[in-house]
Amino acid sequence: MSSQIDRKQLWQRLHQRLLSGSSPTVTGEIATEFLPVIIRSLSRVFPNVNDPHLIETAAEEAIIFYLDHPAQFDPARASLFTYLRMRAKGYLLNTLGQQKTSQGGDKVVELDGAETVYRVEAQDEGDAETALIERESQADIEHRLSEIITDPAEFKVLALMLEGVRETSTFADALGITDQPLAEQTRLVKQCKDRIKKAVQRKYKI
Amino acid sequence: MTDQESFATLANFARRLRSDPRYMSYVLAKYQQQENIEDKDLARELGTLPALAARLALCKRPASSSGQFAEEVREIADYTLTDEAQLAGILRQVDTLEKLAGRSTLLAGSGAEEHLPIPYAGMLAAARDRDEPEADESSLADEERPEDEA
């Protein structure tokens, strides 16, 4: 349960950073956090959708809309995951409805950009567990990099970098240098980050 | 969803953003065009993992004219474990060539190119020139980096 709370706090922070427009990495963090799990969640809800690209496209549409209009998400009404999944579901249903109509089937049910679904299902947090993700992608990256960054403290710094953490104090804590003067902490943290990046470059650069 | 599927999902999304100049995906696509780098070689060119190259493409594009440019490039470099000097170079190269191409297009419509001292096409070609020794680029990047080896 606590990890679920942590996750929701992370989502809140991502949302605030996106709203503030001050972080160039937050769009990547949001896509990495949500896109694979929304696709997975919708694939479970719509197992009979023959073309998996429809689900993928719907999830992408939801993310793009949110990145362009973050203020339309109201954190008081639902978690970010629920909001994005509902938007994606709305896009998917519209697409499926349009396909059905073009094939002579029933009339399309317009969902107005999933807003209706969002209202109806805003409180449905059951699937939020889906997003307490199995963050395989991150785990895989960390696993591969653990062969290069073998020092445990430096590896903590690496993991924080991959999470988009910026606060020097967090890195200083990971390195166990919080007793140092602030300027020295800043210097040592930067030195450690540069050392990590250089080690990765040495391994992977052409 | 496996690691590979997650990566493919993010890579597909990044490809979709290639036409949006607000994203690094656009910058990287332009850079790949200019330097003739194939998708499969991009991560190695950047010296990072393919999954992190996909993340990089999903980041917002720092404006090279912004006072925050250096800080934003550093933030992206930290998040994707890439070299900030190389990233800054890529951004500036793409910006410069876009500006030149834009001016060239404008001038082509006005007939003013006749008065230019250097043909823009030649400038573009010179800016794209990859025949120079690559070591120059990396050594320059190294010079810009702080001493950080223990």
Image (tube, coloured by chain):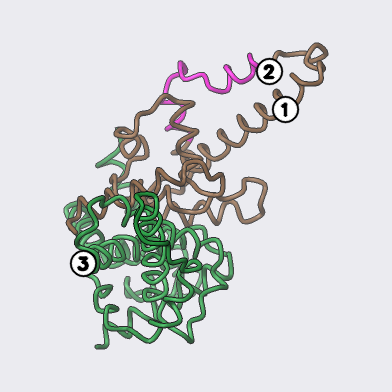
Q: Which residue is mark 1?
A: B103
Residue A90 location in percent, x, y?
A: 41, 67
Chain drawn in brown: B
Give the mark toward the camera: 2 or 3. 3
Q: Residue at x 19, y 53 (%)?
A: A144
Cα gap from disc 2 to disc 1, whole angstroms = 9 Å
Outermost residue to the top? B114
Chain appearing in green on the rendered image: A
Residue highlighted by disc 3: A44
Chain letter of disc 3? A
Determine if marks 1 and 3 fall on one subunit. no
Label 1 or label 3, whichever lies nearer to me, is 3
Of the residues shown, which amino acid type is indicated by label 3?
Arg
Residue A45 x/y as whole percent:
24, 69
Q: Chain of mark 1?
A: B
Say above or below: B116 vs A194: above
Dot 2 and dot 1 residues touching (CB under 8 Å): yes
Q: Position of residue B83 (x, y in %)?
A: 42, 45
- Residue B97 vs A166, above or below: the answer is above
Q: Is residue A121 above or below residue B13?
A: below
Task: Note whether residue B150 is visible.
Answer: no
Q: Which image quarter is the N terminus of chain B in?
A: bottom left
- Disc 1 marks a residue whose amino acid type is Arg
Residue, disc 2: B120
Q: Which residues are magenta?
A: B120-140
Please give the name of the residue rendered at 26% of the width and 50% of the height, measured from the top-left corner.
A51
Q: Is residue B6 left or right of residue B136?
A: left
The verdict on residue B137 being magenta is yes
Of the image marks 2 and 1, the number of the one nearer the N terminus? 1
